Amino acid sequence: MARFLKSTTAITFEVAGAVAHVTLNRPQTHNALTMQMLDELNQAFLEADARTDVNVILLAGAGKSFCAGYDLGDAYSGKEVTAEGEEIPYRSTAASIDDDCWSMEGMQRKLGVIFQIHKPVVAKLHGNCLAGGTDIALACDIVVAAEDCKIGFPATRANGTPPANMWLYHCGPQWAKRLLFTGDTILGRDAARIGLVMDAYPAGELDAAAEALAARIALVDADLLSAHKRVINLGLELAGAQTLQRLATELDARAHLSRGPRRVRFREDMAQSGLREALKNRDSDFGNSVVTLNWAGK
């Protein structure tokens, strides 16, 4: 029996050659994040960190995408019902700004384990890595992507600001602002050029490249890898990374209260027509949303 990871329905976990393979496994929804998935991810990272046969963790997504973001029907539900049909009055994200912060802080604690564990985590991105998917990916120690992977946070157009925000630390202030101000996406090949991911590969070569990188890292003893990871992460802490996560969560909760026309319309569309129509109307004015780099040597 595993010490931390008791069972899985939303992810898979296996160990081979000192590499723990953790895979998001809801391919029918492009691996949209649910509370169950966050719980299992948290447990999987703790399990891999505790095992002496693991030196590195490789995080991936099954199916056509790494992760398309949060499953909104699951992530923002505050209702639980007992076997007797009695509703338990848990906090709802819509009740108050403090309840919203409380709810998102719970999610961030689960994702925060990636930064806190001793062993390095390599994220392998393909297909779509959007919204909450970037929360996970950018928390990892190294990120590699398919050249055609779409990376971005379209929800910044009408929904809020990323509650887990490592954009600044990966690509610097101007590119972080450029992508978050517009909600545009950037392809993996260009994300590598601006430092948002470490490197990009043709889609057909991504698996082999990520496996080779993880295997190479796994050659180093776990306690040495821990020292390397922790000293760099201490540098990030000194640069305010952990404090910023707390502030980003609170500012996201404040952004949810916006009465601007785009925010109001999105909420009305959600209530009247559902998510698909709300997303269509949110994004239609932006047209082609993929950033095209315009610089010498591209």
Image (cartoon, grey):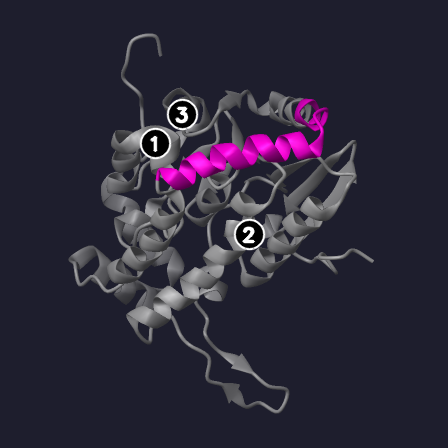
Residue 142 circle label: none
Residue 290 circle label: 1
Query: Residue placed at 35% from the left, 12% from the top?
Result: 298
Identify the amino acid type marked 3.
Gly
Outermost right residue? 1
Q: Is residue 247 left or right of residue 145?
A: left
Q: Residues within 10 Å of mark 2 (few under 14, many from 20)?
A: some
Q: Position of residue 223 (x, y in %)?
A: 68, 34
Kindly indicate whether the residue at mark 2 contacts the one at mark 1 (C-beta within 8 angstroms): no
Magenta stretch, main secondary structure class: helix
Mark found first going from the N terminus, 1 or 2: 2
Q: Taking the image as drawn, is residue 80 in sight?
A: yes
Query: Residue placed at 43% from the left, 61% from the top?
Result: 105
Query: Residue placed at 59% from the left, 51% from the top?
Result: 28
Please state the extent of the stretch shown in magenta in the rendering: 215-239
Mark found first going from the N terminus, 3 or 1: 3
* Residue underneath mark 3: 195
**Of helix, strand and loop, which one carries label 1?**
loop
Is 52 magenta? The answer is no
Q: Is residue 92 left or right of residue 55?
A: left
Give the vertical position of 45 relative to 293 (above or below).
below
Identify the amino acid type marked 1.
Val
**Of helix, strand and loop, which one carries label 2?**
helix
Q: Is residue 18 left or right of residue 226?
A: right
Give the vertical position of 26 relative to 295 (above or below).
below
Q: Is residue 247 left or right of residue 217?
A: left
* Residue underneath mark 2: 29
Q: Residues within 10 Å of mark 1 (few under 14, many from 20)?
A: some
**Label 3 – label 1 distance at C-alpha:** 17 Å
Q: Position of residue 161 (x, y in %)?
A: 31, 51
Q: Taking the image as drawn, is residue 125 in sight?
A: no
